[in-house]
Image (cartoon, helix red, strand yellow):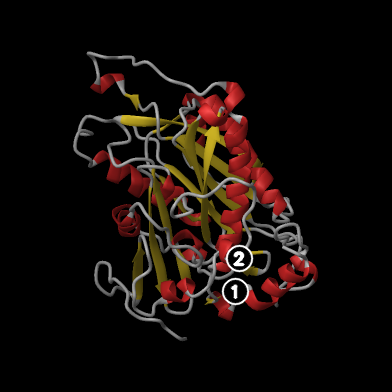
Amino acid sequence: MRWFGVFILAGGLAGGTWTRIVAGPPPAVRTAESQAEARPRARDLGIAPGSFEPGPWNAITDVAGVRVGHATIVSGEEVRTGVTAILPHSGNLYREKVAAAMHIANAFGKLVGSTQVVELGQLETPILLTNTLSVWDAAAALAEWMLALPGNESVRSINPVVGETNDGWLNDIRGRHVRAEHVRQALAAATTGPVAEGSVGAGTGTVAFGWKGGIGTSSRHVRTGGADGTTYTVGVLVQTNYGGRLTIAGVPVWQHVQPPRRDEGEDGSCMMVVATDAPLDSRQLRRLAARAILGMARTGASGSHGSGDYVIAFSTTNRIRSAAFNEAAPSAPVELLHEERLSPLLLAVSDATEEAIYNSLFRATPVRGRAGHTAEAIPIAPVRELLRQSGR
């Protein structure tokens, strides 16, 4: 196997496992992340869904306060997995919850903590993404991390939120190689600014449309209410691991650029996380979350029987302070965006989701893993030429 070296060694060399902690821009050394740096994002190819402009990083972290961190687990020939953490703000989320909502397109998946988010419309922990058989280990580690935070000494209930996709084609998923230290590493690595994409974190072992999938992100600045309105930011992060007929900017790429391993009806999943600084409640956020599926559909998703397609949306505004910690002020005024000004945000979510999915493919690097399986990165040159010929 060819290795690209310098890694941050987490907890020493144990069982031959190296853990890359990825946060912010890739390091200057030639690592797997610098390989991804050499690959373009969608906008580098002229692919810019919609009319809204992205934020400075074109990432979910363009929403002020949102941080993302990865722990990438690569061991021997069989282990290709990881953890991605999304933190809505830098404070104690249990003490300052955020409004949140879920949308489920197809529920063949494991989304730990989803029922309480649906019931209460609140998010009280960071969101973790990982592989299917590691969600419970990750959830336990996240709960432990939250309970240990200063100010949570008396807390007796935590609702960790952990999503997944199945990376078992490239990864020894039955080995359940995600440990508590990997969760802590992803959380500690979380930062604002640019987000590493492609074959990192929870996207290390994923496959989309027969090509190497992974983590992708995008954002939009949206002015609501016309010239006198307010500008808000919407950001999306995806973990792509699903099948279908790849379509880019309306061009049927699947007809012309085909992966070595092709199965249009292949089962798989996509986790989508939507963040915004617009003052929305859980009902409004549920409407935003539903629009992410429109962006996914534009990419040619098959929506197969075995897909687990989930969207989690949250707003960083109007934090919900627990009455247990705020007895003097058990309630606070809440500002909400008027319904008639919601439409631009709804459109921005679908556009950003579409672009985030393209970024997850374009930035991914080839991965060889379990049983000698290899997921190739989508080739840039023929896609670029096909888009050019199509006037895109």
Give x and y (percent) for residue 325: 24, 23
Please name the amino acid that badge 2 sits on: Val
- The residue shown at (54%, 62%) is 214
Q: Is residue 95 above or below residue 13?
A: above
- The residue shown at (60%, 57%) is 357
| Label 2 sits on residue | 207
Give x and y (percent) for residue 300: 73, 56
Task: State the mark number for residue 135.
Answer: none
CA separation in Å, label 2 and label 1: 9 Å
Of tags 2 and 1, which is closer to the observer? 1
Secondary structure beneath label 2: strand
As drawn, which residue projects farthest toward the front? 227
Secondary structure beneath label 1: loop
Q: Quadrant of residue 158?
A: top left
| Label 1 sits on residue | 377
Residue 89 can be seen in this image: yes
For the C terminus, which image quadrant? bottom right
Residue 224 is left or right of residue 135, and the answer is right
As drawn, which residue projects farthest toward the right? 255
Give x and y (percent) for residue 109: 59, 47
- Crowd rating for badge 2 (residues with CA inside 10 Å; few <14, some 14–19, many 20+): many
Residue 262 is left or right of residue 191, and the answer is right
- Crowd rating for badge 1 (residues with CA inside 10 Å; few <14, some 14–19, many 20+): many
292 and 230: which one is in front? Answer: 230
Please name the amino acid that badge 1 sits on: Ala
As drawn, which residue projects farthest toward the bottom? 1
Residue 379 can be seen in this image: no
27 and 267: which one is in front? Answer: 27
Q: Is residue 151 above or below residue 44?
A: above
Sooner in the amino-acid sequence: mark 2 or mark 1: 2
